Amino acid sequence: MAEQDEVKRRAARAALAHLPEEGVLGLGTGSTACHFVDAVGELVRAGRKYAGVPTSERSRQQALSLGIPLLSDEGPWEIDVCVDGADEVSADLDLIKGGGAAHTREKIVNYASRLNIIVVDSSKLSTRLGEKWPIPIEVLAYGHKATERLLAAYGRPVLRMTGGQPTKTDAGNVIYDLHVEPIKDAGGLAGLLALVPGVVGTGLFVGRADIVLVAGQDGIRTLERPRGAR
Ligand code: 5RP
């Protein structure tokens, strides 16, 4: 476990080479992204002029404890680089995110960023999304069982639980993990799921990773979306 965490730390720190000397950074959520936030804290203490936009209350608390100045939640922001983790990365560099229930805020910050860097260990790589991970879907608490019925047209929705209670997002919504077969058309499915009443946001990030830094036992691999596709 400690070894796995060290691999995640190496992936996160590899992102530092892509940061501007100063500017606005999107601060991802999760056990990999938290190593990046730690590193930004070190840079701020060393005098770098960064401001952060956190993607969850967890990353907000971490950033505040490290003295990283934060922009207000309202936006709009001009974010230079966002660094975040992922649960699954396909061969096309599409992503499933939301294992930490933060994907709706993560997606808002991702879309506000000029450069999106995803940091993962090699266990997250797959050929097609859905091979390894269900799709986390943030659903409005009101009528969530009605939304569940509609989601069942696309897979097997499972209400995520924490301590015997439905897991709540930072916005007070619930999460359904939608178990699907490996996905042929992630963009098409993302569009259909977004139309389901009650769906606040899905963990499908299609075409939203510019650079994926993959840490393994043999070092760091850099996977890049072709420039024209950005
Ligand atoms: C949180 C996320 C995380 O980035 C994702 O779950 C990866 O987390 P970890 O680095 O802990 O494996 O999407 O909503």
Image (cartoon, helix red, strand yellow):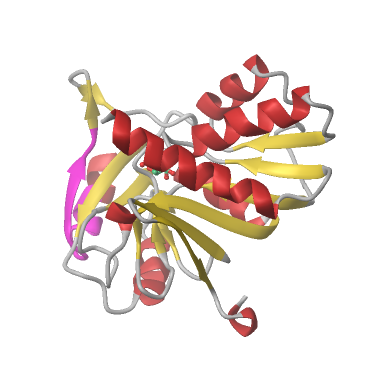
Residue 123 falls left or right of residue 37? left
Quadrant of the rendered image holding ligand 1: top left
Q: Quadrant of residue 74?
A: top right
- State the residue at coordinates (53%, 46%): 106
Q: Residue at x 61, y 58 (%)?
A: 116
Give how far across and how far down residue 111 sits, in percent: 63, 58
Q: Tell me the quarter of the image containing the N terminus.
A: top left
Q: Residue furthest bottom?
A: 228
Q: Give the left or right position of residue 40, taking residue 217 as reference.
A: right
Q: Is residue 133 visible?
A: yes
Q: Which residues are magenta?
A: 148-160
> Is 43 drawn above or below residue 196 in the view shown?
above
Q: Position of residue 168 (x, y in %)?
A: 37, 28
Establish if 73 lies above or below 134.
above
Task: Tell whether 13 sits left or right of 187.
Answer: right
Q: Quadrant of the C terminus?
A: bottom right
Residue 157 is a magenta residue? yes
Q: Compared with residue 210, is residue 73 higher up or lower down, i.e. above or below?
A: above
Name the residue furthest front.
218
Report how many numbered discs are placed on residues in the image.
0
| Residue for point 43% across, 69% down | 93
Query: Is 204 included in the stretch rendered in magenta?
Result: no
Residue 139, percent across and down?
36, 43
Residue 25: image quadrant is top right
Which percent across, then down, holds residue 212? 49, 61
Residue ID at (42%, 67%): 94
